Image (tube, rainbow, N blue to C red):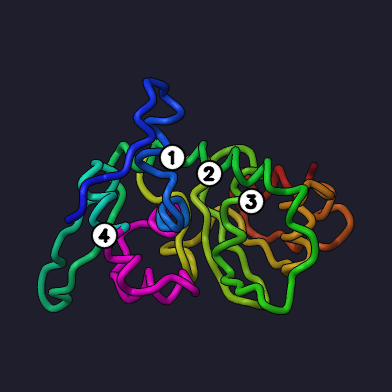
Amino acid sequence: MSPRRSYDQYCSVARALDAVGDRWTLLIVRELLAGPRRYTDLHADLPGVSTDVLASRLKDMERDGMTARRRLPPPGAAYVYELTARGRELLPVLQALGTWGQAGLGERRPTDAVRAHWFALPLLRALEGEGLVEVLLGEGTFHLRVGAGDGPVYGDGPAPRDPDARLVLDSGTCTAIGRGESTVAAAVRAGRIEVTGDGTLAKALREA
């Protein structure tokens, strides 16, 4: 394993960038905020990354205490990567970057890949309260753990149990929320988001 490159500056920003400033590192964190992932799943949801670069980044992140690798018990018997507590501390960093990047998002380009769960973090920023939320888009389904204090904050696919709220919307509405052009409450009032469920969060959204 090659030695980690450093800016060699006695500054906390420089030290942070020593660990997460390489290309793909923060996007790997974005994927692992959904919980443990196999290497093949990470590679599939990071279009454009080479296998060598992904393997190198995961080794660096494990060395720096951001991720851990463990073997699933039989019958799975596969290795998965997951964030450590230190890695999960990067959630507000990604949230801040997402907010800062809203202005440059623009319209989707023909070359832009998209995954349904990439809308999870913008929606997570936009929702208040606590609860399990299932989100249905044309591109796919994912779920959010709003207000989660620990562990995964979102996941791909349907919610693992009956959600507190279920949101049905299109990617255009998600994009508008991510760009700050709309709020979730405003989209609900405009009929752009259908809300079902009996949880406190669902009722608050319908009454907003």
First reached walking from the N terminus: tag 4 or tag 2: 4
Circle 3 SS class: helix
Label placed on residue 122: 3
The reply to whether dot 1 and dot 2 touch (C-beta < 8 Å) is: yes
Tell me the residue that label 4 is attached to. 81
Q: Farthest residue toward the top? A: 10
Q: Quadrant of the N terminus?
A: bottom left
Residue 34 inside the magenta-drawn segment: yes
Q: Position of residue 36 (x, y in %)?
A: 30, 60
- Residue at the spot x=73%, y=56% of the render? 105
- Residue at the spot x=43%, y=39% of the render? 90
Q: Position of residue 208 (x, y in %)?
A: 80, 42
> Which stretch did the figure color magenta?
29-56
Tell me the residue that label 2 is attached to. 94
Q: CA distance from mark 4 to mark 1?
A: 16 Å
Q: Position of residue 9 (x, y in %)?
A: 39, 25
The reply to whether dot 4 and dot 1 touch (C-beta < 8 Å) is: no
Mark 3 vs mark 2: give the one in front. Answer: 2
Quarter of the image where one finds residue 175: bottom right
